[in-house]
Amino acid sequence: MVIGTAMFFLHPVLLGISFTGSLAYALYLGGKKILRFLLLFLLPMMVVLSLVNPLFNHRGVTILTYIRDNPITWESIYYGMVTGLMLGAVILWFSCYNQVMTSDKFIYLFGRLIPSLSLIFSMVLRFVPRFQEQYKVILQAQKSLGREVEGGSLPNRIRRGIKVTSMMLTWSLENAIDTADSMKARGYGLPGRTAFSTYRLDGRDRRMLVVLLVMGGMLALGVVNQLYRIQYFPSIKVPEAHPLTWMFFLAYGVLCYLPLIVSGLEEYKWKLLQSKI
């Protein structure tokens, strides 16, 4: 609900709530690593997107200046800023998702409904970190044999790089086949098969599900009443303020900040229990 709303409704208030919520939760999960990613990659990418969009999109009635007879309009600049904000929020939300949703959680949720797709998706989640680790191992092995990819003439570096790439492709294919054969031997996806899991649907989950459904229903009601619709071209037109609009913004804010609130309360409870020991 959070990512879909941020992607399909380019309302600056919604995107501001989504970006701040995703940034706060990403910093909580990743700390300095996320901060470095934000400063070195995400913010420059958002700024570049905001600046590049007016160079190619010349729609809009408020012309600020001309560059080589091409008009630079305020509407295109504003739309580029909103698009950059949307892209930044979505990237941050997916980075949070990648840290929270592990492969065992995904298989628990969807293993019985879509066993094949859930297995493939869990393999994809595990593939990137394992691929990086294996790549370092192969590079170290090649370096021990005197076949460094970084050193030597250009033809030798290209030849050794192609060889390392071939090794990585062979390893990834063999690993995928081994995983598929292993899961098939265990009866994965067969009707009536049971699986051990540490997850249980308890009272807290049911209460949280009710909160999510209520907030999602409020968002859907706002969509039906077109409270999120905003026009950027040819001129910017924002729908008139409605008493329910701020309530829907509040509902979206609850959805965006709910993971941080829940994680923060759990951490506070844990530290409180540790202090009593």
Image (cartoon, grey):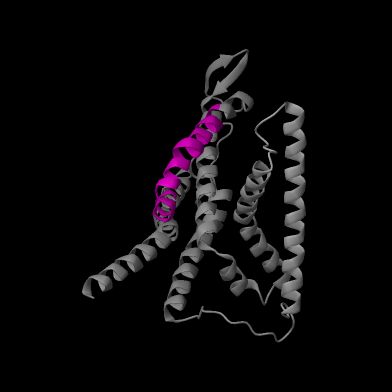
Q: Is residue 80 on the magenta stretch?
A: no
- Write down the quadrant of residue 264 in the picture: bottom left
| Residue at x 58%, y 82% (from the top left corner) | 196
- Of all residues shown, which one is farthest toward the front? 145
User: In front here: 200 or 13?
Assistant: 200
User: In front here: 85 or 72?
Assistant: 85
- Left or right side of 139 for 75: left
Quadrant where the C terminus lies? bottom left
x and y percentages locating residue 8 in the rendered image: 58, 49
- Write down the quadrant of residue 233 in the picture: top right
- Of all residues shown, which one is farthest toward the top? 68
| Residue at x 63%, y 13% (from the top left corner) | 69
x and y percentages locating residue 28 in the rendered image: 39, 54
| Residue at x 63%, y 46% (from the top left corner) | 140
x and y percentages locating residue 27 in the rendered image: 40, 50
Q: Over which residues does the magenta segment extend?
A: 23-51
Q: Is residue 130 above or below residue 141?
A: below
